[in-house]
Image (tube, rainbow, N blue to C red):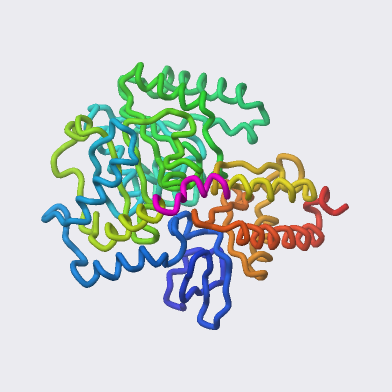
Amino acid sequence: MSHLSPLLVQSSGICAERGEGNWLYDQDGNRWLDFTSGIGVTSTGHCHPKVVAAAQEQVGKLVHAQYATVKHPNLLELTDRLYKHLPAHMDAVAFSNSGSESVEAAFRLARQATGRPNIVVFRGGFHGRTMGAASLTTSNNKVRTGWAPLMAGVSVAPFPHSYRYGWDEDTTVDFCLEELDHLMITECNPKDTAAIIIEPVQGEYGYYPAPKRFMEGLQARCKEHGILLIMDEIQAGYGRTGKFWSHEHSGVSGDILITAKGLASGYPLSAIAASKSLMDKGYPGSQGGTYGANAVACAAAIATLDVIEEEGLVEHAREMGDYLLEKLTAIQQDFPCIEEIRGQGLMLGAEITSSPGVADGDHAAAILKACEDDGVLLLRCGHKGQVVRWLPALNVTREEIDIAVGAFAKALASTCKNQDKRCSSCKS
């Protein structure tokens, strides 16, 4: 451990030796209920038997078939299987390893296809840590600080954070669309704009779903000006929100879709999808990578789709998300420091404040530590780390939700009691 980079900041003190379902175990046999799912990656839980079997079988046949050199059967099958879940007009897929890589592949395609340089992003978005992806990220300055200048050609528009602005949804949407129009007049001419990229549910900033009318407004402006709309479904996609893709809640589909995280139940794999006609406008050889579409990762991804389809995990995520929201809302009545609960499906965030509108990341951290001590693993997000996020595997059970929410309630009770100047509204 002494030789691990000190720049890697970990949220828990756990050293996991194995995982099973929604549980993690250390070498001493201690266990934790994992409501992080590797930041939304282990969508079918840890070591789902079907995924394990598919990966083990593939390891014995072919581990690496570099897909810019040769094809392999899993690559072809996965592409066809993904196509069935994509918006109807998206009939071409390109693979990479990580979300950041696919984000960069998406805006590279957008720039090449349109011949335009600029990209519009939204305040609070997280798109990755590599140079281009970090240049699009504004959820927290930790991925941007200390290595400027970042990529040029990026303009930031406001996202409809109704809670942050303190406005109702309609007022917030009107303001954000007006500001986007203003941005295009003053800073980012539509004739120079290749794409607008959005998380239909913002992740790292605090689990904000984009309202339907806002998404419709983006689509209308993109069509009017010939701007490509990119859906970043890296965290919110693949069944997480109770629909296969989070943009389906709005009825708005984009021109390019990005997926990663839950795609292969823990194996590194990401992808972008678009129409063949759009892909044809990119430059030959501009997509690829040494490990993209790795044969073992593709086998795991096929098995992941099998599990999602056979076990009805998209609908299950919706049902369990409703149940989790119900349980958290009940707790909220007793603890005013939970100022808002938001999100969709099994992607929920609880905003922790010391007083109305005052984010309290220290209290959220204390809550997580108390939960960890009680055998439940959770994560934080938000610009000050003030949002406790709920991100279990898609096959989580009611019983496991009850355990996790029970630990959360105990943690709130103990940490609110021990607050000095914070959380005065909960002390009574």
Quarter where residue 245 is shown:
top left
Q: Main secondary structure of the magenta part?
A: helix
Which residue is more in the foreground, 323 or 31? 323
Which residue is more in the foreground, 52 or 108? 52
Question: Residue 18 vs residue 207: left or right?
Answer: left
**Residue located at (39% from left, 67% from top):** 49
Magenta span has 349?
no
**Residue located at (78% from left, 53% from top):** 422
Q: Is residue 43 above or below residue 281?
A: below
Residue furthest to the bottom: 28
How far across and down, in percent of the image, does residue 17 sit?
47, 76
Q: Which residues are magenta?
A: 309-320
Q: Is residue 168 above or below residue 126?
A: above
Asked whether residue 354 is in view, the answer is no
How far across and down, in percent of the image, does residue 48 sit?
42, 65
**Residue located at (30% from left, 45% from top):** 82
How far across and down, in percent of the image, does residue 11 sit?
55, 63
